[in-house]
Amino acid sequence: MTGEIFRDPWGIPHLRADGAHELARLQGRVTARDRAWQIEVERHRAQGTSAAFLGAEALPWDRFARRVRLADTARRCFTALEREDPESAAWVRAYVAGVNDVLASDGTVRAPEFARAGLSPGRWEPWTPLAVWLGTHILFAGFPAKLWREHVTTRLGAGAVGLFAADGPGTSGSNGWLVAGERTVTGHAVIAGDPHRFIEDPGVYQQIRLSCPEFDVVGLAVPGVPGIAHFGHTGTVAWAITNAMADYQDLYRERLRRTGAGVEALGPDGTWRRAARHTETIEVAGEDPVEIEIEVVETDRGPVVIGGPEGLDDGVTDPGGPPLAVALRYPPRVTADLGFGALLPLLRARRVADVDRAADRWAEPVNVLVAADTDGDTLHRVAGRVPVRAEANRTRLVPAWDPEYAWRGWHEPPRDGLTDGIAVMANQRGPAAPLGVEFAPPHRARRIATLLGRRPRWSAADMAAIHTDTHLASAAPLLEHLAALGTEDLTGPAATLRDRLLRWDRHMDADSADAAAFAAVRTALVRRLAAHPALATAATPPPYPEVFRPWLALLPRVGYALEHLLTAEDLFGIDRPAAVRAALEEVAAEPPAGTWGDTHRLAPWRALPPSGTPHDEPRLSGDHDCVLCTSPVPGLTDLAARGPAARYVWDLARREDSRWVVPHGASGVPGSPHHRDQQPLWLAGDLAPVLTDWAQLTKETDV
């Protein structure tokens, strides 16, 4: 036997091979069969070549990918991996060989999008999985938030930064919790959670089982990347992560000048030094295809991602006068290490101590990790690389020519324990607090802890009720403002609506008309505040590259920071009771006709729009600050582009009692019976069993 592919009733691949490298090749083959279009889109995005078949809409990303040097960084990291960890490098090569085996043969047959886009699969290089990983996470830490802080400081003053903090811009997050054996019915730990990502079709996680004589692991893989990085269960130990919300990417204002030989940058020692410079051409598909030439510049700090020697396109300069140029410094570009040396040790882990040692090799992104094993040991720590540098680096752009802002080593990743046998991670201020600036509001973490405290013992089967909890604690400030309104100041319909909302149970259920009414008032209020002259000056973003615009948009910032804006001692003199009253009257005059689920629907991202009749996307319960985190953008849209990209429950008593689900299905091929077959489970809050008995699986083929 070299390799065997089995499938469970949901089409989830279970792979068995003679060794780790044979298994990696088999994983590459299965991923290319099930997700050919998806992983090829990601390969092109990492290379900055997606506009060649997706058109001008993909151009802003391609510009950024080229300028930030994603592909070159991946090459550097793989070269270092070959030198320092040849076994892991050979394992990655085996995965790539499996991908190429399929893409060179039947990949296009199984993925009709290739024909629609006029694209043929390309050849993967050994470094391509690293590029896919980096492309997925380069914006994950949200360094553009520093651009927002600069913008809001310039337009509204330094005091406004805290008002809009909202402990995070709402671009990433996850729930995860560990219940130790002392708090379970079996006496063994349970780990559960759900990563919150942009919901894509196909999904961003791939359920898979990898089995060979060395290990047998079930978990959620990232398509295009070997192994099981984020969420896995080896039978004797299980682990899960959430985004630590750490700050580990810096933006440096550069002083650049052109010379006869190229471009020079002013360094922190006062010396002008040659910057790396070259030009690249981006192809853009369309009725009249074009080629766009861009300049790529890199200083000793990092790649220049905004502006250049002549500043921005409109000649914007720094406050001090020179043309604006901003370089990004990020750890993998500095260290040539993406942490891929952790992936094989994770698969081979047998105990918590093994996971802990593997986590020491983790680099990007920075995560909070929990783990538990069948011996009763547990782990709660931060994993990843965060530089030591001046406090200002973490909050704003800093001058590249000042030595005060240089990196000075790496932080020791913090560790934490359990409280009453429980650890909760929901992107809140926790063990990673010393490493970050903005974190998620505490509502999800507090709610999970509260729910877990309601009974002395838990089982794996009980966890779905926590996954789907819809209580919205962040509704309190707006409801308190409504309660403070005098009835004499309201029209009859507004008073009736106010009283109805004050009786509401604060659950954002899809079939709740009260939740719909609350969301409508919230939307009306957010729009009024954003349009107020006191804030409107920040509505026009600076002319930075388009890829950064989501972080610079005022309306979403007001929506996500609404709690702070309603509870701050002063909001630039804005009459908040009057704004709340006007929003209430507006909705009372034209109340929503249906329930929350009528407008709160899933809006998954697809590289190409679906062919034929569009899917009727499902109604959703939940909201941004619910445990069931299906995030609309208050003030902008009720549609949810982000949400639980998977759910999992790892049972350390019996792995076969573990459960999992994804928003769509195991297959990325439209029309496949397993393309969307898990969605009913996902919507209902149910999970599919993790089958581990090979006799219950259907053998697909030998390889």
Image (cartoon, rainbow, N blue to C red):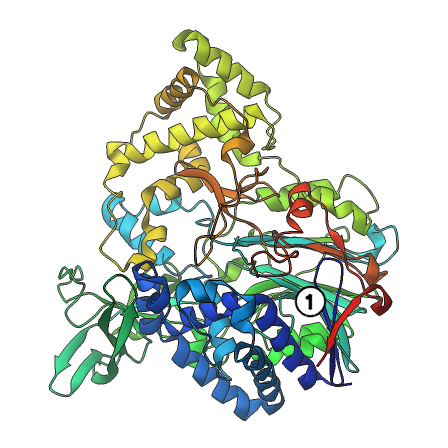
Instruction: Name the residue located 29 percent from the left edge and 71 percent from the top edge.
Output: 283
Instruction: Name the residue located 20 percent from the left edge and 70 percent from the top edge.
Output: 308
Instruction: Name the residue located 47 percent from the left edge and 28 percent from the top edge.
Output: 478
Q: Furthest residue to the left?
A: 260
Instruction: Name the residue located 64 percent from the left edge and 48 percent from the top edge.
Output: 679
Vertical relation: 602 (above or below) 88: above
Vertical relation: 16 (above or below) 627: below
Q: How many marks?
A: 1
- Return the x and y of residue 340 as percentages of the image width and height: 57, 78
Tell me the residue that label 1 is attached to. 208
How many other residues sit within 10 Å of disc 1, few (<14), some (14-19) or many (≥20)? many
Residue 314 quadrant: bottom left
Vertical relation: 141 (above or below) 517: below
Left or right relative to 634: residue 10: right
- Return the x and y of residue 593 as percentages of the image width and height: 49, 22
Q: Quadrant of the N terminus?
A: bottom right
Q: Amino acid at mark 1?
A: Ile
Q: Nearer the viewer, residue 688 or 610?
A: 610
- Return the x and y of residue 267 as percentages of the image width and height: 25, 79
Disc 1 secondary structure class? strand
Vertical relation: 672 (above or below) 487: below
Q: Quadrant of the C terminus?
A: bottom right
Left or right relative to 44: residue 23: right
Residue 350 quadrant: bottom right
- Return the x and y of residue 487 as percentages of the image width and height: 45, 9
